[in-house]
Image: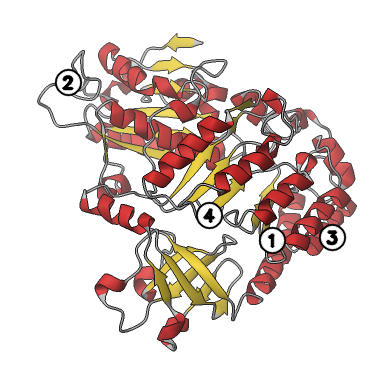
Amino acid sequence: MSTTLPHVPADAAALLAGPAPHDAHDGARAVGAPARTYLVKTLGCQMNVHDSEHMAGMLEQAGYVQASASDAAAEAADVIVINTCAVRENAADKLYGNLGRLAGAKRARPGMQIAVGGCLAQKDRAGIVDRAPWVDVVFGTHNLDALPVLLERARHNERAEVEIAESLQVFPSTLPTRRESVYAGWVSISVGCNNTCTFCIVPHLRGKERDRRPGEILAEVQALVDQGAVEVTLLGQNVNSYGVEFGDRGAFAKLLRAVGAIEGLERVRFTSPHPAAFTDDVIAAMAETPTVMPQLHMPLQSGSDRVLRAMRRSYRSDKFLGILERVRAVMPDAAITTDIIVGFPGETEEDFAETLRVVEAARFSSAFTFQYSQRPGTPAADLPDQLPKAVVQERYVRLAALQDRISFEENQAQVGRRVEVLVAESEGRKDGATHRVTGRAADNRLVHLALPADLPADGAPRPGDLVTVTVTHAAPYHLVADSALTDAASFDVRRTRAGDAWARRQAGGEHAHGGAPAATAGCGT
């Protein structure tokens, strides 16, 4: 579908001061003019984060330059792209809140353009421009590659361009990519989803599963390693169904082993698997491949078998707990995280008690917990017995309190342990005040660590370096490793190719705005 709409009604014309100069041979700027700047704002899951890297890569290939950190914070860019999510009820609120704020910025910055992409764009289409007529471009999940052309077309025609493809036009991983991190990166192994969960709109918006060939994936991982990366996260809506398109049910386990064998790669992660398709060959590959980290994100969604049936989740609580038991049998220190939905239509107090029982038994290191949101277009939206908000909220609070207790207890068990931390760029918001740096342990726990008092400036760990420390304190959502303050010998820095690559980027003036890929909520797999 390709639709062209009037850009702005007469009473809103003040939002635009006319198109910026352009040249037919240069989509980003007129000949001799400064390069136009861009900012990509990401709302949603890991898939959106990686899609945003492709959007940035395409804009840079077209001649745009990334806005500086200070301009990004002030939303002062010539082009602002909002990459949207449609999974949660507040997704639209987040989008239109951002757009309402940007309306004023656009009035103050003649020639500024606003583009909206991602799942909500795929779903709402021209309705976005109807509601926010100062938006210049709307594009969907299947045609990321169209972004630079649509921006130029909107500038030339002085009206909004809405282009939504109904099926995948170009596999995203073939597009240019501007990686936010030089030391860790996402690698997409598939797009789309073949599941039919009643609460989820993702298959409708991203389509059926499409798998990349193993050779393409391995080549991308090798290229990342050659550029300095030491950590890779394999990404898909349902990674452990990888291979279904080309008829190899064991493909994901084989892929894990092959990626893990790439020389120079130190950490391999993946997200998200589906419990119904999680097989023992994957557990074996995790346990037998040293670079595959002892960490697993396994979405539960509900502990009630009755609710799981209503959700059209093709596993039951006993099978779910059995998977966790088998994982821990070969990887005792594995940290397991999950997604849980509270208040699904028809959920009784007895159903919710089953969820609490499974959470207690599972001992998740952390959980992404959500209140059920009624999403138009999903089967669950039309189910009877939609629960009152007050009931859902009360149950949500109880679940959060239980998981907080479990997370704290599990983290307390880490105190006294030696952990190797991959230093990140910007995950610790209080690091400046506490004189700590932050990163992720092998099991993906967030660790804030102190530096020795007598550490020379050129000896400080850089993002991408690996630091071995002893955990001294625990909190529900992070660990603290202050052992270096009392025992400098307990602090060991291993400077890496990744740290060297980060230093080169800094010296070249390229400042990534984000850290390494971290634990992020899934799209409901």
Amino acid of disc 1? Ala
Q: Amino acid at mark 3?
A: Arg
Where 525 falls versus 379 (above or below)?
Answer: below
Label 3: how many Cα within 10 Å (few below 14, some 14–19, many 20+): some
Helix, strand or loop under label 2: loop
Query: Of the residues tagged 1 and 3, which is closer to the observer?
Result: 3
- The residue where tag 4 is placed is 267
In the shown orientation, is residue 288 left or right of residue 138? right
In front: 264, or 384? Answer: 264
* Vertical position of residue 387 compared to residue 367: above or below: above
> In 3D space, how far apart are the residues under numbered discs 2 and 4 (Cα atoms)?
46 Å
| Residue position for label 3 | 357
The numbered dot on residue 226 is none
Evaluate if marks 2 and 1 touch, with contact meaning CB atoms under 8 Å apart. no
Amino acid type at circle 2 is: Pro
Cα separation, mark 3 vs mark 2, equals 62 Å
Q: Left or right? Give the position of 410 relative to 157.
A: right
- Local secondary structure at mark 3: helix
**Label 2 to label 1, Cα distance in Å?**
52 Å
Residue 135 at least partly seen: yes
From this view, report whether residue 461 is shown above or below residue 1.
below
Residue at 36% from the left image edge and 45% from the top image edge: 227
Q: Which residue is mark 1?
A: 400
